[in-house]
Structures are given as C-alpha cells and as structure tokens.
Image (cartoon, rainbow, N blue to C red):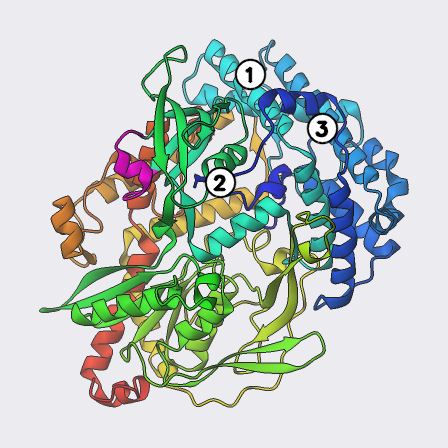
Amino acid sequence: MKKQTLLVAMSLAFLSAYGHAAPAADKAADKAAVEQLKPAAQQTQAALWASRVLSRYHYKATPLDDAMSEKIYDRYFKSLDAEKLFFVQADLDKYAGAKAKLDDAIVGENLQMPFDIYNLYQQRFNERIAYARELLKTKPDFTLDESYQYDREKAEWVKSEADIKDLWRKRVKNDWLRLKLAGKDDKAIRDTLDKRYENYLSRSRKLNGEDVFQIFMNAYAMSIEPHTNYLGPRASDNFDIQMRLSLEGIGAVLQTRDEYTVIREIVTGSPAGMSGKLKVGDRIVGVAQGDAGAVTDVLGWRIDDVVQQIRGPKDSKVRLQVLPGDAGPDAKPVMISLVRKKISMEEQSAKKTIMEVKDGAVKRRIGVISLPTFYQDFEARRRGDKDYKSATRDVARLLGELKKDKVDNVLIDLRNNGGGSLTEAVELTGLFIDKGPVVQQRSAEGRVEVENDTLPGLAWDGPIGVLINRGSASASEIFAAAVQDYGRGVVIGEPSFGKGTVQTLISLDRFAQDKQRLGELKMTVAQFFRINGGTTQLRGVTPDIKLPQLSDAENFGESSYDNALPYTVIKPAVYIPAGEVKDIIPLLTKKHEARVAKDKDFQFLVDDVNYIKKQRKDNLISLNEKERRKERDEQEARAKQRDARLAAAPSADDPILVPDPKEAAKNAVSPKPAGAKQTKQAAAAVKGVSRTDDGLQGDERSLAAELEAEKAAKNAKDVLLLEAVHIMADEVSLLKTDTRLASRVLPYAPDR
C-alpha cells in the first residue's frame, strides 16, 4: 500500500526461520533505547555511493540538491510517523533547518542529523505510549458525543502537546470501547491494553541503526520515484530468497508472541517436519551452531535476528533449545538438533484446481491456475541448472496436467500478484501465443526495445481468462495486457495497480572498502509499454468484464503516489492479433450481469463493498457507546443474513471443486460444492470482506485461534473467483454452439 509505517525498514523481512549473523540481545536493545543511535561508517559510505548512482543512472535522474533535500525531509518524517501520532508541529519546526541540508549530509558523509531526528521520534514514541498507559488508570466516559479519525495519513501535523494528548485520549478510548463491545470487563480491558502498549515499546526498542538508515535511505530513494528502494544487507538477502522461492534452513515459519519466538507453521518434508520433534506453538528460547557451539539465549529478540541465527548453509547443523507449546514458562527446555536443507517455498508456487459448472445436461470443466508471484531462481538458471525454479515452467507443467484432465477453459488467477521477473512475464505469455512481441521497454535515453516470445508453439491453445485486482502489478500487468492486446483471452476483475516501470538491482558492495556490505539499490531504469503503444503506468489494465472493486483506489495503487511517472504512449509494436475475443465480450457481459443480479452472495458482497467505501469516506468512528452498539447490532444482523446464506445448501448452479486425485487419496477428501456448509468462522465473510471485531490484535489471540481464523478465511466462499469461473464456462458454451465465433476467438484451434 501507499501508506508507510515505522516498520518500513523491515518490510522485506522474511518471517520463516530458514540464517547466520550475530544479533543484539534484548539487553542491548534496551540500552539502545537509552543511548542515542548513531550512523556507522559504512552507512555514510553507502549513502554517498547510492546518491551518485541515483542522480546519474535512474530513469528519472534527479540531482541531489536543496529541492530534493526538502522532499527527503518531508518523506522521512512521514515514514517515521505516517499517522501523525507522535510528532507535533514544534518537532518539525525544530529541524526546519534540515530541510535544505540533508543533501549536504549525504554528500558530506555526515548522517548525524537524520539519526537525531529518529532519536527525537523514539523519545516522542516513548512519551506517547507512557501517556496512553497512564490513561488506563481512569475510565473513559462513553456517553459523550465524540468521534475518532482512525486514518490520519492525510491529516495535518498536530499543533500542540495539548492536542496530541487529546488525540491519544481518543485513541485509547476507541481501543477500550472495542474491547468493551466484545464483552470484556474493565480489568480485562486494562490488562489487555497495558500489555499491548508495552509490546509497542518492546518492538520499538529493538529497532537499530541499520533500520534507521534504511528508513532514511528509502525516504531519499522514494522521493525520486515510488518503486526505487534501498535494501540493506539483510533486506537484500531476503529479496533474493523471495525471487528464487528457496533457501537453506530447517523449514519452520516463526512469529513473535510475548517476547517468545513461536513456531507458527512447519513446512512438510523439511528438516523440522521430518524430525517429528517440533510442533506448532513450540517456543524457541535458545540457538546453537554445530555440535559444540554455545547456546545463545534469544528470548526477547526481534524475529529477523532469530531467523538469521537459524538459517545457515545446507547440511550444516543447528541446535534449538525449545519450550513445548503446552509447557509453562518455568518448564525445562528440550534441545533439538537439526541438519539444514534446501527449503522450497511451495506456498508461493503456481497451483491448479479444477471446477465444474453445470450447463444444462453437460458440465464445463474449468482449470484455475493461481500464481502468487513471477518467480525465478536467476542464479540457478545462470549456472545451467536444468531444474531451476521458474513460474513459467511450473505453469507449463500445470497446463499439461489440465490437458490430461480434459478441461474446457483455463483461468489464470493473478489477484494480489505484485509482479517479479520481467523475463517470466514474457515467457509465460509465450505459453499462450505462437510467437511475437510481448512488451516494449523505453530507457532513460529514449531507446525502445521490444521483448519477444521467440519460441514457436503453444502450451495451451484453448480459451483463457485472466483474473486481476488492484493488487495485480508490474509483471502481472504485462501478462494481462499482452493477453488483452492479442485478443487471446478475457480479462476479468478490477483495474490493476498501474505500475509500468522496470527495476534492476545494483549492488553497492562494489564500492565498499574492506569488503564491507553496503546493500543494494532497487532502481527504476526503464518504463514498459504495451505492444499497442499504451502503457499500464498510472492507469493499469482495464478488465474486459469488471467485478466489484474491493480496494481503495485513492490510497492503493500507482495513482495514490504523489510522484508517480505520468501516463504516456509510444509507437505500437508490429504484431498480429491472435484472436477477436472482443466479439464475445458483450455476450459474456450480458450473461454475467443477468446471473449476478440473482446471486445473493454476489449482491451481499456488493453491499459490503459499498458499506466499507462509505466508512473510508467518512473516516470517523463514534466514541459514544450507545451509537457504537447500534452500529455493531446492524453489522451483526447483516452478518447473520450472510451466515444463513453461506451455511445453506449450495445452489445447483454453484461451481463444484474437483479435488486432485492424489490429494484426495492422501487426505481422504471427497468432492464438495464450493458453497457447501462451512464452519461459523468461514461463513462469517466472503473473500476479502471481514465483519467481526473482537477488539484484539493478532498476537493477542491464542495461536490456535489465529490459525483457525486464517484457515476459515482461506476456505471461505470466494465469490469473485466463482463468478469468474462462471464466465469461463459461459465462454465455452458460446464457442461450442457457434463455430464461426469460435474460429474468430480461437484461431489457434479452429476445430474447437
């Protein structure tokens, strides 16, 4: 999202325990909260070299001058305090002289000023939380006619100390009222909120100089253009892991809960899973390397420091000191020894399902391929590894399986796929076209290059659809736009993100002295254009058939950035359309509109979306208990309607999920309708819309309850996906009954 938070520096931190490096313990973190953080020598060096690269080689090369300094100043304060809850205007005034001097600080290799600003932020953070905890000693008056603005990103900076205290009074009052409405008594509310605020302090204390430097450098990088970032050494490692979807470790996903590092998930087939000694909920309190390494106490450590201790080279040994999840804090830990192996992050890999839709006396089989990201193991490909990880290779394999399953149509689900490898986007498009251009790139010098699919033949010659939403960006937009421009398939969903820029990674380590690690720049170097000459920049891909827009376009997407590159056009590439899918769009739209007008689940979703849009627009929540109870009762009434509908017998028209025979045999599952009776939690929401509020945050619920809620949400009825499947089935029916239309829409398969 557009919104930046205190933890922007750790946005790439990977929460799976799969590493090496020496972290600082909790006592050192407490000490850092007292002592003032200072820049390190390698950080000043990294900032200088980053400025030289950014000001010369960026697609939108911008000099580091006083004008840029002012932009960095504004963005840095907003990065630290996005919701304007900690600083007051006097704090900004105190450093007004820095507005035109941050460029000098970078060039002069003296970053004390941005660190001083952060140290003031930490002081204000501690003061605000201390005040919030003091407020818990009194009881709020919920009979007053007051309201709270819960989204303050666009608000003005608070003018005075009195005003900031009043803002925090309302914030605490809202936290209290949420718990009160959920049935908590005053003592339970005080205990819950006091612990919550203490946890805020604990997490804040664990931020270190590397985090501060990354926040500052991102304020600089993103002041040039939204998709340019500085990655510190650790963030750089994690970015590489995300792209190759593999790492070397034990195969456990970790989470911090009450200062403990807790096992949240165990990867099947991993060392952690194969050992049988670790269970979800177990707490790691110590880590040791090899057979004889000393045990390091990790109680109270930040999660990425623990992860770095547990990761390590393949075939090396790590020993974990573990408190079982059902044991008390004074129980004796057990020591578990594991050998690290290569772990494949299969949850981010392409996956397929098959759904059947009734069409009179016949059934249309629709293959759905979900692709969360455009991944590729670049290093494995460079060294010639024939089994390197690749999104295109995985999708090609799944298409082959779907052919054997005799599906009639294929839907590529790219919702919330933020992109990845440009090469993968081009090669994936090549699975559905014979040969030809896929995307154009324009460099900063104005040179245009065309990226082509050069391999003849198709992996799938039948009809296809692409499902997108606002979270579909970059490589997803390249693929969807190419499918649309070639007339190859139907694009369904909401307008995409609008990211039409190309980034490359530039290592700063080459400039380092004494082999220090300076990190990397993820820098925009080009803009991509559709083969029709337009760009997805700013406007995104407009679907052929629109579904309800769940996201907030004002605060999410390229158009929400204040410095996004503009929309523009260039000369179209030379290409031959593969089909005339536009001829079938009006017919599909008519069927879609008639169906959803009678679909109660779909209309419930539309109602929920409109309700949420109104809440976003109002941006105020009442602090009057009577008013809030009325609102809650109305929401619960709406929820009961949906529960009754979702728990009822499925409609005869509902698509049926056809389980994979291998998975069915392994899990002993039987086919069931997507709208079959579900758990109460699953029935509580259609995909993307939540209606319950227990007043708690994630780590305040039990781990079992949190995991169960996530499972229920995952299994909840996905109304938008089911409608997209219906549209794919409609297309099959139209093509089966009109051979002339089929010959125009599917020129690659004229016999269909």
Residue 312: x and y in percent read 46, 41
Disc 2 versus disc 3: nearer the observer = 2
Residue 345 numbered tag: none
Answer above or below: position of 136 versus 107. above
The amino acid on which the numbered mark 3 sits, given as a three-letter code, is Gln
Q: Name the residue at 78% across, 36% down.
A: 115
Does the magenta-highlighted stretch encompass residue 617? no
Q: Quadrant of residue 28?
A: top right
Question: At numbered mark 3, what does the secondary structure look like: helix, strand or loop?
Answer: helix
Disc 1 versus disc 3: nearer the observer = 3
Within-10-Å neighbours for mark 3: few <14, some 14–19, many 20+: many
Q: Which residue is mark 2?
A: 19
Report the quarter where the C terminus lies: bottom left
Residue 231: x and y in percent read 63, 50
Within-10-Å neighbours for mark 2: few <14, some 14–19, many 20+: many
Question: At numbered mark 2, what does the secondary structure look like: helix, strand or loop?
Answer: loop
Count the labels in the image.
3
**Sooner in the amino-acid sequence: mark 1 or mark 3:** 3
Does the magenta-highlighted stretch encompass residue 273? yes
Q: Name the residue at 25% across, 32% down.
A: 276
Residue 194 numbered tag: 1
| C-alpha separation, residue under disc 1 versus residue under disc 3 | 19 Å
Q: Which residue is mark 3?
A: 122
Question: At numbered mark 1, what does the secondary structure look like: helix, strand or loop?
Answer: helix
